[in-house]
Image (cartoon, helix red, strand yellow):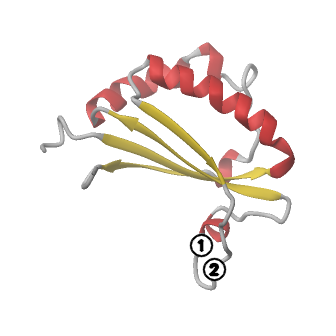
Amino acid sequence: MNNATQPYVDGFVAAVPSANKPQFIEHAQTAAVVFKEHGALRVVECWGDDVPDGEVTSFPMAVKCRHDETVLFSWIEWPSRAVRDEAMPKVMQDPRLQMDVNPMPFDGKRLIFGGFNTLIDQ
């Protein structure tokens, strides 16, 4: 596959206050609709269940997860990076995702994110 037609994934890890789980679900459901309207194929949000602390590195350490928080792992699948790059400015400007309308129920400064080319999808 060449990069123009290769599926693309945006990945995220965050620490969410455990008490904010209902607010996070509402926030994420709204965001998923917006991402899909702009070309995302799939939006997956996963609430930590078996996420151990590490000795050198780990998901909890990476996001400085506190005792009253849960690690969130999520990803957005796109048909290509080009589709993602065209959609992202529109997503970020969408009125439904503005902080005064749909605030993030977690500390966005500890959100880890990145874009990834798909190597294997079986």
**Quadrant of the frame with the N terminus:** top left
Q: Please state the horizontal and vertical placement of residue 81, each as a whole percent of the image.
A: 29, 36
Q: What is the CA distance from the residue labelled 2 to the residue labelled 1?
A: 5 Å
Query: Is the residue under label 1 in contact with that under label 2 (CB below 8 Å)?
Result: yes
Residue at left offset 55%, top offset 21%? 33
Please name whichever residue, 73 or 82, is drawn nearer the observer in this view of the structure.
73
Q: Please state the horizontal and vertical placement of residue 99, each as a whole percent of the image.
A: 71, 26
| In the depicted structure, whether residue 91 falls above or below residue 53 | above
Q: What kind of element bears circle 1?
A: loop
Q: Please state the horizontal and vertical placement of residue 77, each as a whole percent of the image.
A: 40, 38
> Which residue lies most toward the front here?
122
* Whether residue 104 can be seen here: no
- Residue on which the image places disc 1: 58
Q: Is residue 20 left or right of residue 60?
A: right
Q: Please state the horizontal and vertical placement of residue 15, each as a whole percent of the image.
A: 70, 54
Please name whichever residue, 21 or 85, is drawn nearer the observer in this view of the structure.
21
Question: For residue 54, which numbered disc appears in the image?
Answer: 2
Residue at left offset 49%, top offset 25%? 35
* Whether residue 52 can be seen here: yes
What's the residue type where badge 2 is placed? Gly
Residue at left offset 63%, top offset 79%? 54
> Which residue lies most toward the bottom here?
55
